[in-house]
Image (cartoon, grey):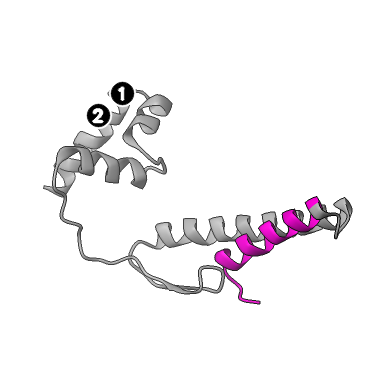
Amino acid sequence: MKNDLNELNSVMFDTLRSLQAGKIDAEKAKAMSTVGGIIINNAKTQLAAAKLLKGKRIQSEVFGGEIEKSNEPKKIENTYDSKTEFAISLGYDTPGKAIADIGAAEFKRLYDECVKYKN
C-alpha cells in the first residue's frame, strides 16, 4: 500500500463498498474512517506548514514526496486572478469567500495594501 492521499481515497471507497455489501461490519468501517480522518488531518497540517515555509522545501510521505513552492513570482494576467491568488494566500478558496468572511471593505484594504507593497 502506498502512503498517499490517492491510495487513502481508494481504500476508503473500498471500505464503503465492503460495508454496503456486508463484507465488513460497521465497527471496522468506523475504525478505518477514524484512521483515515487522522491521516487527512495530518495532510492538512503538512499543507499548512508548506504554506508557512514560503519557498522552502519539505518532505511529505502523504503527498507522495517533496513539496516545493517556487520562489518565482507568478505572472498575473488580470485583477480577478490577482484577487483570487490573494484570497488563497489568506486561506480562502475564492475572493467571494474571503469577502463573505472578512467583509468587502477589509478585503479591499488588505488587497490594496498587498498590491502597494508588491509594487
Q: Was residue 16 drawn as part of the magenta stretch in this picture?
A: yes
Q: Which residue lies at the image location 51% right of the left edge and 68% below the top edge? A: 63
Specify start and end residues of the magenta stretch as a single range: 1-20
Q: Which mark is residue 108?
A: 2
Residue carrying label 1 = 104
Secondary structure found at label 1: helix
Q: Which residue lies at the image location 51% right of the left edge and 73% below the top edge? A: 64
Coordinates of residue 33 in the picture (x, y in percent): 74, 54
Q: Return the residue nearer the eye: 73 or 93.
A: 93
Q: Report how many numbered discs are placed on residues in the image.
A: 2
Q: Was residue 59 drawn as part of the magenta stretch in this picture?
A: no
Badge 1 density bin: few <14, some 14–19, many ≥20, Cα 10 Å:
some
- 71 horizontally vs 51: left or right: left
Coordinates of residue 10 in the picture (x, y in percent): 63, 63
Per the picture, the main secondary structure of the magenta-coloured stretch is helix
- 14 horizontally vs 69: left or right: right
- The type of residue carrying mark 1 is Ala
Coordinates of residue 110 in the picture (x, y in percent): 27, 34
